[in-house]
Image (tube, grey):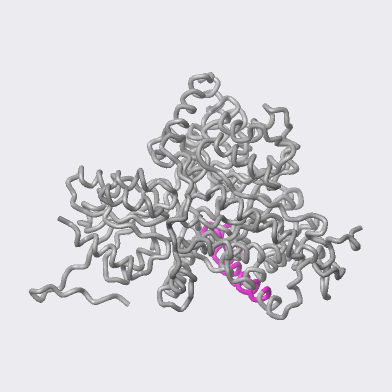
Amino acid sequence: MTEPAEVLENGEARPPLRVVLAKLGLDGHDRGLKVVARMLRDGGMEVVYLGLRQTTGTIIDAVEQEDADVVGISMLNAGHLTLGPRMVDALADAGLDVPVVIGGIVPDEDRLAMVAAGVAGVLGPGASSDEVVACVRAAADSRS
Amino acid sequence: MADHDHRFRTLSGIPVDAVHGDGPAPGEFPYTRGVHADMYRSRLWTMRMFAGFGTATDTNARFRELLAAGGTGLSTAFDMPTLMGRDSDHDWALGEVGRAGVAVDTVEDMADLFADIDLGAVSTSMTINGPAPIVLAMYVVVAEESGVDRERLAGTLQNDILKEYQAQKEYVFPPRPSVRLVTDVIAFTTAEMPRWNPVSISGYHIREAGSTAAQELAFTLANGFAYVEAAVAAGMDVDDFAPRLSFFFNSHLDFFEEVGKFRAARRIWARWMRDRYGATDERSMKLRFHTQTAGVSLTAQQPEVNIARVAIQALAGVLGGTQSLHTDSFDEALALPSEDAVRIALRTQQVIAHETGVANVVDPLGGSAYVEWMTDEMERRAEEVFAHLADLGEGSLLEGVYAGIDSGWFAGEIADSAYRYEREVNAGERIVVGVNAFTEGDDPSTRRLLRIGQDTEDLQRKRLATVKQDRDDAAVNATLARVAADAAEPTTNLMPALLDAVRARATVGEVVYTLEAEFGTYVERAVV
């Protein structure tokens, strides 16, 4: 089920990506995030699942403690325009170069605004496991 | 009366009887075929559209449009801060005020929400759980301040906290004190609000979180049995309160599975209430339910196709004998429903009710070998779950449900089912039209979505500040002190103290903090 670790040019195995997954804010819909957690694990990544009602502060703590490569946050309550950019800014303020992927109900016309605010990827309803894994991997690769 | 009424003829003019087939008739124990003898012939289901967004004034306008368009009941969606018992000026509320429902901080918001609507004449459903008793108290106070006595109020409070820990995750306090609040509401409405349903025992959210149909059925009825045991343990007689317990199910895409689920639900409830809980009033044995079509089945891709999905799901609810129905709007996988999409959803119900002829007959699928087998199969699978929970609870379903929550068993079962489904879709074993097959023709340019701006939040915070400024703080504090004292006394019903507090203009958040100080705050163990 789990994909083999990638092999780097010098022959060493590339360490698996570490992804912090959290529900930011009050929204309790966690079906999508739990499915994404399993998709990423099956895709060979390490998942730090924080669960519900996280703040930018608790997410940053986890990123630092776990040395995470990517943050994934999920919102189905139309809070993404406020909370997405706030997560990006909070990571930057903490001096962390960790990209943010947002999943949930994000209307198409908001995607550009999300990207403009520095969000590395947006995953909507119906995204396949390949798309989810590819999106997180691309986000990790986008780091400066 | 109406056998010769044109309504009970087919489109071609053939007169039809209400009931066809043998066996226990509709309206007779165990009510597999329906809780009424002639079902929709004497009364159609209630077309109850769930609505709520922005400020109370915004939602009030939507309510009045729905009533004018032929809706026959109101159903209120609250925003996340309200559902979690936090005021609009709380840090957590930033970005969430009025976005996924209406913001209600004080009884003044509740008054705006129902302005110019005669609360003695409509029935109102309020979808809220953790702070449910506070919101019920606000509704009662608004009615009384507009001259409508609480005895006349008709409606339903969701107030189903157990499924929150299992699926929807909008809890505030830990399970045991929360169930005490549920039984306080049951005791209060049983004594003082005879037209009110104090709990809507809900499978909807369990299913949306990813469960199978059989899990939805089993977990929901187990929660229902748990409330019955809790209310009896609190000293109530089963036939005093059970007739007002109501249910809320999902109607998903597998048509016959859904119909079998609804039929099995009625039969299981009737048998358990009579045989296990000793009910003698047949109203205690009749499972009445609301249905909502499956939001999770709607696709963001080619969303217009959702209109067809909703119509099929709604038909399953009607053929399953639902008492009320919400049809989802086709744009829900994209945003909050727009006004046009809501109207199409309501019209879909009206087509089923008035054009298709299905309301002329009771349980027309009864007697189908497949439907009867599916009904039996649903019951068999549910009984397996009840046996497991009774084991966990050493004979008590209430204790079994607590144990399943504490150990994360329910959440784990639901997450497993959700992931199994996603893998099947991913592998192409299941076709989702427009998503993994038939994908051409998606046109995002035609969509007009409802947007809630930041101005709602600013407006609501100002409104809250004004109420706080105009009220008598000493009176508020005195009423909150009584809430605290009554909370500490497990056998005291909290409703009178809550009524006093909200009447004095205490906020939802203030009452919740007061209760949290006594009950604690629930934090779930995050498991994937």
- The percent coordinates of residue B20 (x first, y second) are 83, 73
Relative side of A39 to B75, left or right: left
Relative side of B82 to B317, left or right: left
| Residue B390 lies in the magenta stretch | yes
Which one is nearer the viewer's eye here, B437 or B118? Answer: B437
In this view, B107 is above or below B121: above
In this view, A86 is above or below B140: below
In this view, B353 is above or below B465: below
Classify residue A81 by image quadrant. Answer: top left
| Residue B31 lies in the magenta stretch | no
Q: Single out the residue that lies furthest toward the bottom.
A: B369
Segment colored magenta: B375-403
Residue B123 appearing in the image: yes
- The overriding secondary structure of the stretch rendered in magenta is helix
- The percent coordinates of residue B439 (x first, y second) are 44, 70
Residue at 35% in and 43% down: A82
Classify residue B416 by image quadrant. Answer: bottom left
**Looking at the figure, which quarter contains the N terminus of chain B?**
bottom right
**Looking at the figure, which quarter contains the C terminus of chain B?**
bottom left
* Total numbered badges shown on the rendered structure: 0
Q: Single out the residue that lies furthest toward the left.
A: A10
Residue B396 appearing in the image: no
Relative side of B239 to A120, left or right: right
Residue at 74% in and 43% down: B195
- The percent coordinates of residue A41 (x first, y second) are 31, 68
